[in-house]
């Protein structure tokens, strides 16, 4: 009673009033607001990083999931397939068949170099589809087959937008080509090339200004070789000046400037020399005739990206655009990415080998980890007497969980490869090493799950006369199972993304074949990512990102499964 | 303490008391240590066969500890050490040659907090008979389960939800399920540690009724904080205080005419 009187009176309660108290409250509010702001800021920063990372990977990787091919009518000759047995069909030479189909699609390519460029647009794996069709149905031999032929990585990338923008404008005058193939000149009656010439001249004028400035700088610097350098520069300036002063001069185009072409009479001519009214150049696509073309019937085409800045040449672009105009180019889902092993050719490289390798490796890991880990946890948690030895083991298990993974790789190298002489690069060894790596994680998770089962359940079982072992295996372990599975999945997800220890045991080799067994040479997804990220080809960058997407999907699925299990088996005791 | 209620109980009790039964459990000089802590000091008590004995006393005085000695549940606590002698049917239960699992099948236990297995109601009751091989067929097992549920007064409520989880029952139903689980293995002794502490008066009354029936076939030891409950259901009462068995006698005598000042103070609510 006295306490209540003191509280309601003007005793201790007074400390909650007055300016000091109000200031204290304000200070508390400020502190809370500050804390909240820090929290939100941290969250925003992490979210932004995550979104940027994921978006970057997605944007880079998505193109790798599709692939372009060109569908052609391929006449399959009747001979060249021996006795038409499966092995004979498999062993036949398909290169001339596809080459002839290409030449038929773009007639008039006579030169060897043109032919080579044309065939280079196809992947070396392009005839595989044709071969598979013929193997499946030998009666197609001697007929004409519509086959999608896989394009090479550069051609594929060109269609994915890594090429050049193309401008095209109708011409005003009448153009007369001097021939249909080879090097020809085209004359226009209306000075259609004046604008282009002006552009080129402007570039030359700028060059002159730049060189003049450089010459002045060199002169004033007073370096030992300045005199010679200035002389050379002045000479270059002089030649450029004469080119500029002569209105009738022809300008040569080089690969550092946007390419200029003329589309005329169903053909395409790449301009090499340019003047106001006439151009000369190389025929990329043969003209149907040398007849004059009237205004509007021919066009001036510009490939805006200079040839030296792209992987595809003007000739390549001309062929590819022609295929596109023919309606032969298709973009399809890239099944090959999932059905083939690694390859030096980006368009043929797939992750099947890495996927199977990962599956086999994780299978070994799982088969070893779960029984050993769970039994070790059950024994340590429920049966082992609590003495110094078990305490030591416990401390060491916790320490093992923190050991850098590369150390496990070295251990695997020393023990499994050198001592037990197991094969290098094999999923078996990878699985063993990863098992060592995740075993501590699983033991710790399993022990935590076992500990989380209320002792009252065990006592209830003991109370009805179950033995200790029965109580553990009938009641405690099943109840701990969701937690153990969650821990296992997280451990396996950890193993899935592990690279370093696998490098030590040789799983980094370039392996084309999809592994068929536990002792075949194999690689795994993260190592595949590591391998591809190192390659110079642009197409492999997309493949790398695509593989990361696949790996992340697996991780998401596994972690999602762990969450689902946790939710599903969440219990009220 | 509400004395008028007790006095009406007393006359009732007198008529119910059976002739002096033989001791089912004999404890002599039992000491329990939790590490260095001396939790139970030299306790000697006899529990008569086919009757209800109540352990009362303030919190922390060692009632549960003693109860857990009787089915050796204390073995599960590593730091716990028991000395002295406890005999059931003249057999020393701390004899190393005795199988503790068999002992626990003979001495069932109902815990303070209902702890059904997170399995179906049927499985909860069937588990004990199954591991002890008490039923030779599925039908027999079902029979055991149903009769156990019936004895625990739960059969009507759960008849058509036998496959629901045991944890989906209410607290009182769970406690009766635990009782059914305990009697399904047909023990000789049932230890109940505050079985009604979480229950409402109606559920409490049902369990007390149940004890009344069960004592025809079983020996029951109950720990309770309710003086009225001890007076209502038990024939003998033991009062513990600070690890010492202060007083033990017929319930009638302990409640109406306690020999010790501490007992008197406790039952009249002067401390505890
Ligand atoms: N597992 C244990 N480890 C250590 N000390 C324990 C343990 N269990 C009980 N004790 C101690 O033994 C003493 C007796 O405990 P016990 O549980 O028997 O009390 P109780 O009479 O059942 O009390 P309550 O009425 O509150 O249930 C207490 O002082 C308690 O602190
Ligand atoms: Mg207790």
Image (tube, helix red, strand yellow):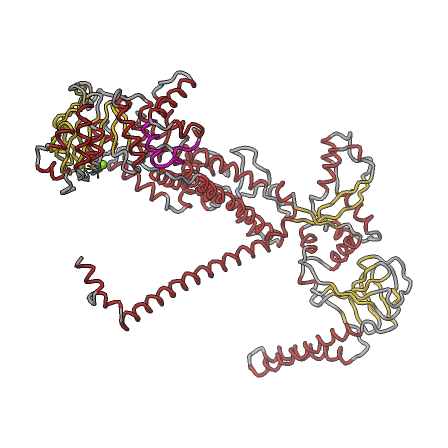
Q: Which residues are magenta?
A: B164-180
Q: In percent of the image, x 85 and y 62: which residue is there?
A: A264
Q: Residue furthest top?
A: B136
Residue A372 visible (yes or no): no
Instruction: Say whether residue A400 is left or right of residue B229.
Output: right
Rendered location of residue A410, percent (x, y) = 41, 42
Q: Nearer the viewer, residue A521 or A24?
A: A24
Q: In percent of the image, x 21 and y 37: which residue is there?
A: B225
Rendered location of residue A245, percent (x, y) = 77, 81
In the picture, the quarter occupied by the C terminus of chain A is top left
Instruction: Say whether residue A515 is left or right of residue A570.
Output: right
The answer to which image quadrant residue A248 occupies is bottom right
The answer to which image quadrant residue A350 occupies is top right
Instruction: Say whether residue A60 is left or right of residue A105.
Output: left
Residue B170 within the magenta-colored segment of the rendering = yes
Total marks shown come to 0
In the picture, the quarter occupied by the N terminus of chain A is bottom left
Residue B19 visible (yes or no): yes
Q: Nearer the viewer, residue A161 or B218?
A: B218
In the displayed structure, A573 sits above or below A235; it is above
The answer to which image quadrant residue A476 occupies is top left
Q: Residue furthest bottom?
A: A220
Q: Quadrant of ligand 2?
A: top left
In the displayed structure, B3 sits above or below A188; it is above
Q: In percent of the image, x 13 and y 42: which residue is there?
A: B270
Residue A326 within the magenta-colored segment of the rendering = no
């Amino acid at each position: 009673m006295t306490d209540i009187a003191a509280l309601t009176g003007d005793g201790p309660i007074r400390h909650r009033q007055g300016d000091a108290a109000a200031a204290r409250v304000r200070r508390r509010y400020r502190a809370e607001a500050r804390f909240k702001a820090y929290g939100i800021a941290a969250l925003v920063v992490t979210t932004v990083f995550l979104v940027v990372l994921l978006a970057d990977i997605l944007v880079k990787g998505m193109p790798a999931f599709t692939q372009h091919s060109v569908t052609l009518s391929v006449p399959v000759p009747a001979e060249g397939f021996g006795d038409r047995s499966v092995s004979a069909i498999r062993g036949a030479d398909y290169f001339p068949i596809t080459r002839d189909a290409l030449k038929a699609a773009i007639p008039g390519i006579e030169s060897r170099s043109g032919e080579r460029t044309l065939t280079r647009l196809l992947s070396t794996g392009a005839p595989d589809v044709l071969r598979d069709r013929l193997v499946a149905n030998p009666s197609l031999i001697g007929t004409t087959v519509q086959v999608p032929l896989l394009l090479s990585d550069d051609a594929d990338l060109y269609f994915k937008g890594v090429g050049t923008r193309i401008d095209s404008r109708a011409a005003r005058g009448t153009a007369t080509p001097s021939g249909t193939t080879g090097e020809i000149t085209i004359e226009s009656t209306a000075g259609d090339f004046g604008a282009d010439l002006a552009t080129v001249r402007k570039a030359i004028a700028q060059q002159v200004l730049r060189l003049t400035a450089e010459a002045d700088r060199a002169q004033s610097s007073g370096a030992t070789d300045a005199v010679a350098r200035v002389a050379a520069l002045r000479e270059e300036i002089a030649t450029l000046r004469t080119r500029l002063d002569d209105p009738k001069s022809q300008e040569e185009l080089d690969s550092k400037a946007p390419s200029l072409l003329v589309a005329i009479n169903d053909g395409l001519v790449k301009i090499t020399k340019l003047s106001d009214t006439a151009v000369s150049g190389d025929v990329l696509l043969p003209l149907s005739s040398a007849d004059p073309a009237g205004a509007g019937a021919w066009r001036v085409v510009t490939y805006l990206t200079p040839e030296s800045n792209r992987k595809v040449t003007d000739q390549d672009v001309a062929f590819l655009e022609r295929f596109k105009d023919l309606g032969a180019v298709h973009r399809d889902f890239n099944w090959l990415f999932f059905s083939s092993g690694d390859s030096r050719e980006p368009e043929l490289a797939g992750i099947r080998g890495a996927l199977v390798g990962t599956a086999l490796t994780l299978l070994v890991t799982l088969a070893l980890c779960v029984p050993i880990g769970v039994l070790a946890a059950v024994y340590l948690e429920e049966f082992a007497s609590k003495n110094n030895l078990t305490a030591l083991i416990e401390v060491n298990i916790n320490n093992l969980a923190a050991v850098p993974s590369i150390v496990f790789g070295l251990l695997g190298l020393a023990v499994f490869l050198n001592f037990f002489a197991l094969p290098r690069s094999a999923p078996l060894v990878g699985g063993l090493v990863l098992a060592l790596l995740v075993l501590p994680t699983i033991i710790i998770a399993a022990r935590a799950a076992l500990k989380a089962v209320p002792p009252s359940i065990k006592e209830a079982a003991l109370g009805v006369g179950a033995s200790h072992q029965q109580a553990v295996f009938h009641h405690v372990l099943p109840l701990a199972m969701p937690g153990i599975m969650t821990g296992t999945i997280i451990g396996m997800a950890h193993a899935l993304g592990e690279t370093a220890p696998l490098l030590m045991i040789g799983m980094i080799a370039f392996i084309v074949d999809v592994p068929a067994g536990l002792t075949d040479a194999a690689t795994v997804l993260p190592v595949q990512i590591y391998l591809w990220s190192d390659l110079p080809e642009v197409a492999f960058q997309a493949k790398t990102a695509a593989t990361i997407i696949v790996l992340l999907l697996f991780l998401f699925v596994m972690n999602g499964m762990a969450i689902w299990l946790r939710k599903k088996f969440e219990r009220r005791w | 303490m509400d004395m008028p209620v007790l006095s009406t109980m007393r006359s009732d009790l007198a008529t119910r008391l059976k002739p002096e039964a033989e001791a089912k459990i004999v404890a002599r000089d039992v000491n329990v240590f939790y590490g260095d802590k001396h939790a139970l000091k030299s306790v000697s008590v006899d529990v008569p066969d086919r009757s209800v004995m109540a352990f009362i006393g303030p919190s922390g005085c060692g009632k549960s500890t003693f109860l857990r000695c009787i089915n050796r549940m204390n073995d599960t606590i590593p730091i716990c050490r028991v000395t002295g002698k406890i005999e059931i049917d003249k057999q020393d239960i701390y004899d190393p040659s005795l199988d503790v699992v068999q002992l626990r099948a003979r001495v069932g236990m109902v815990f303070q907090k209902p702890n059904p297995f997170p399995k179906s109601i049927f499985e909860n009751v069937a588990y004990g008979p199954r591991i002890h091989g008490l039923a030779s067929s599925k039908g027999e097992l079902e029979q055991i389960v149903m009769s156990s549920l019936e004895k625990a007064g739960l059969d009507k409520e759960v008849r058509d939800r036998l496959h629901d989880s045991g944890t989906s029952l209410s607290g009182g139903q769970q406690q009766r399920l635990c009782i059914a689980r305990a009697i399904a293995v047909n023990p000789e002794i049932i230890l109940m540690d505050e079985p009604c502490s979480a229950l409402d008066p109606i559920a409490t009354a049902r369990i007390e009724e149940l004890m009344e029936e069960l004592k025809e076939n079983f020996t029951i030891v109950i720990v309770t904080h309710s003086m009225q409950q001890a007076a209502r259901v038990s024939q003998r009462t033991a009062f513990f205080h600070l690890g010492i068995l202060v007083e033990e006698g017929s319930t009638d005598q302990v409640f109406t005419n306690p020999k010790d000042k501490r007992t008197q103070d406790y039952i009249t609510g002067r401390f505890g």
